[in-house]
Image (spheres, rainbow, N blue to C red):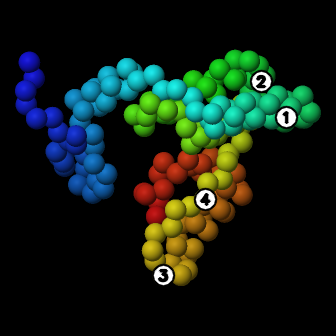
Amino acid sequence: GQQEEMTVYEKHDNLLHGENMREKVVSSMFMRKYIHVARVLKPVLTREACDLISTEYTKLRAQETSSNNKAKTQPVTARTLETLIRLSTAHAKARMSKLVEQADAEVAIELVNFAYFKKVTPKPKKRKAQKDGEKEAGGTREKRRRLRSGDQSYDPYGFYSDEEE
């Protein structure tokens, strides 16, 4: 058996990770165990998540029938409802939760809106304690400009926000 202590993060190696790496890299052994445990979980939908998914599905169906001029990638069917439930459940599993909560449903809705209608939901920015005007001079104004200009490099989910700021 494997009795050695498992490390969560890889040791920093300049050759592999670069000299100015800021984020830690999760070890492959930890990731394997994490996925193994997450697969076993069977999260249950909470009433709040269920209500949110059903109302959003109803809105999607109504939106599809009322506005045919929108560029959509595929029709909204019962399969869309199943997708919302599946994505919510997957998000709960990734959080290692036994319950599919409203936050999980919101993430699933955001993904489906983007996949079906290319609609990006603006997120409120988490602000760090800093002097007034410091942030605005740097990244935020630039991001807004790129969003308006339709630049393809805009990252709606904030995956690269740490690198840009």
Kindly identify the amino acid type of the residue bearing the numbered disc 4. Pro
Q: Residues within 10 Å of mark 1 (few under 14, many from 20)?
A: few
Identify residue for label 1.
63
Q: Nearer the viewer, residue 99 or 144?
A: 99
First-in-chain label (1 vs 3): 1
Q: Position of residue 16 (x, y in %)?
A: 22, 42
- Asked if disc 4 and disc 2 are in contact, CB closer than 8 Å, the reply is no
First-in-chain label (3 vs 2): 2
Identify residue for label 4.
124
- Asked if disc 1 and disc 4 are in contact, CB closer than 8 Å, the reply is no
Q: Position of residue 149 (x, y in %)?
A: 71, 56
Q: Residues within 10 Å of mark 2 (few under 14, many from 20)?
A: some
Quote the CA–CA distance across marks 1 and 4: 25 Å
Q: Residues within 10 Å of mark 4 (few under 14, many from 20)?
A: few
Q: Is residue 161 left or right of residue 109?
A: left
At x 64%, y 58%, the residue is: 146
Q: Which mark is residue 131?
A: 3
Kindly identify the amino acid type of the residue bearing the numbered disc 3. Lys
